[in-house]
């Protein structure tokens, strides 16, 4: 029957990184004063986990910021180790001689505020009592995350990023960086993202949130003291399964899985309500995988920020907001993306041009849907390399 934990492998209550776990390549930065959030709340002892590759130039001019997607983290490149069970999310794209060449660029990737891999998030200890924030953790916007990262940039000695690059949720952050701090961004590459979440994108997020809220083991967000196997793994796995459908295209699902039944079953067997199709087994696998490396509350917090994303909010609309961007742009869309359709990237490109900003638009031709920016490095990498190389350094 689908949805059951694997024998001998109970699900962890949270897949969050916790103090005392192996650090891996993570570095940590903690603000020395309270941090005010857009929603009115304040966080104390805010910590950001980040990783770096390459060497920062003496004048800080060769720094490139990578912004990760929804369930990514600071581990953009590198082999699995004790601190990171998976290869980097852009493995093969970041490193010596690669698309983002760490022999030339000082590359930084930060686990977002509200995340669960070392940055302050719902699983982190609250400064008042040392217990996990849980339901006490406030809503965090994309703008909050950018402002927090600006403090890290100050700490690193980066006055101006040579470029800020990111896809999906990370692309939202790219736009906010260029709008909030136009004088601190030399260039931007937003990939498979949008200026504001659409109603359909919000709808997909709402279904995932409902799945988590309906899981009795979620306990309103205060589940961290539950025994192993008794956390909200079913709600998070279901939310991930819903999202996974939007990450790939119909053609990829059809070509890979068709209508085949899983587990050796055939239509000549007696029919059973819980017989799985191969595509169900695929979704089960990805749901189970996420539960083991992510935190349910962080999934909610980050997803809500994506739904709230609107660069025009409080800025007199999209046109006025995008006119603040001073950095040249390389905007990328994916022709088979059903989650962030290409009309949204074309809108970014057109708004930038209308505001007098230099912008080039590139469309990735891939059957893989939204995840193509992580998969088709042969199409994504060379344009990024050329884009970074053509920009003057140290302006």
Image (cartoon, rainbow, N blue to C red):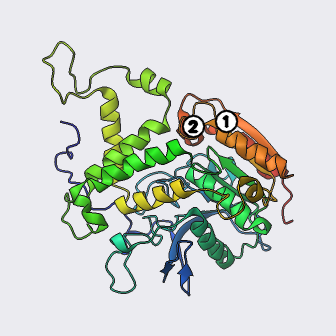
Cα–Cα gap, marks 2 and 1: 9 Å
Q: Which mark is residue 372?
A: 2
Towards the viewer: 29 or 210:
210
Dot 2 falls on a residue whose secondary structure is helix
Assess disc 1: are there few (<14), some (14-19) or many (≥20) residues with their C-alpha within 10 Å of its C-alpha: some
Which of the 4 image quadrants contains residue 364?
Answer: top right
Residue 139, image x, y percentages: 47, 67
Left or right of 329 in this view: 144:
left
Residue 208, image x, y percentages: 38, 48
Dot 1 falls on a residue whose secondary structure is helix
Q: Is residue 385 visible?
A: no
Residue 272, image x, y percentages: 15, 25
Residue assigned mark 1: 379
Towards the viewer: 21 or 211:
211
Q: Nearer the viewer, mark 2 or mark 1?
A: 2
Please, which residue is most extreme toward the front here? Answer: 316
User: Which quadrant, please, contains the N terminus?
Assistant: top left
Q: Kindly identify the residue that appears in the image at 70 percent across and 53 percent down.
A: 101
Assess disc 2: are there few (<14), some (14-19) or many (≥20) residues with their C-alpha within 10 Å of its C-alpha: many
> Is label 2 in contact with label 1 (beta carbons under 8 Å)?
yes
Residue 89, image x, y percentages: 52, 50
Q: Decide which of tag 2 and tag 1 comes sooner along the chain.
A: 2
Q: Kindly identify the residue that appears in the image at 65 percent across and 46 percent down.
A: 191
């Amino acid at each position: 029957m689908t949805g059951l934990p694997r024998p001998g492998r109970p699900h962890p209550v949270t897949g969050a990184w916790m103090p005392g776990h192996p650090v891996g390549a993570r570095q940590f930065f903690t603000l020395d004063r309270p941090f005010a959030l857009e929603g009115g709340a304040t966080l104390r002892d805010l910590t950001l986990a980040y990783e770096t590759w390459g060497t920062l130039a003496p004048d800080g001019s060769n720094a490139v910021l990578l912004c990760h997607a929804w369930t990514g983290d600071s581990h953009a490149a590198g082999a699995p180790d004790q601190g990171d069970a998976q290869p980097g999310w852009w493995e093969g794209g970041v490193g010596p001689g690669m698309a983002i060449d760490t022999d030339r660029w000082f590359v930084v990737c930060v686990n977002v505020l509200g995340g669960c891999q070392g940055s302050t998030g719902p699983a982190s200890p609250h400064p008042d009592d040392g217990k996990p924030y849980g339901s006490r953790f406030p809503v965090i916007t994309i703008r909050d995350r950018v402002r927090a990262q600006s403090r890290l940039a100050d700490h690193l000695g980066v006055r101006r990023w040579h470029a800020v690059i990111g896809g999906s949720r990370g692309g939202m952050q790219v736009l906010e960086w260029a709008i909030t701090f136009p004088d601190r961004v030399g260039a931007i590459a937003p990939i498979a993202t949008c200026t504001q979440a659409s109603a359909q994108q919000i709808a997909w997020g709402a279904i995932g949130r409902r799945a988590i809220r309906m899981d009795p083991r979620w306990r309103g967000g205060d589940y961290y003291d539950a025994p192993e196997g008794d956390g909200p793994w079913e709600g998070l796995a279901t939310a991930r399964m819903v999202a996974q459908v939007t990450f790939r295209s119909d053609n990829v699902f059809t070509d890979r899985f068709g209508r085949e039944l899983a587990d050796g079953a055939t239509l000549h067997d007696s029919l059973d309500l819980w017989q799985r199709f191969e595509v169900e087994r695929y979704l089960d696998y990805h749901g189970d995988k996420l539960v083991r490396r992510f935190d349910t509350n962080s999934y909610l917090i980050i997803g809500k920020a994506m739904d709230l994303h609107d660069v025009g909010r409080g800025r007199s609309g999209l046109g006025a907001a995008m006119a603040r961007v001073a950095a040249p742009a390389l905007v990328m869309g994916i022709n088979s993306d059903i989650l962030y359709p290409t009309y949204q990237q074309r809108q970014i490109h057109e708004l930038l041009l209308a505001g007098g900003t230099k912008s080039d638009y590139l469309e990735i031709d891939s059957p893989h849907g939204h995840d193509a920016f992580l998969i088709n490095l042969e199409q994504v990498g060379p344009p990024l390399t050329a884009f970074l190389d053509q920009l003057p350094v140290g302006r």
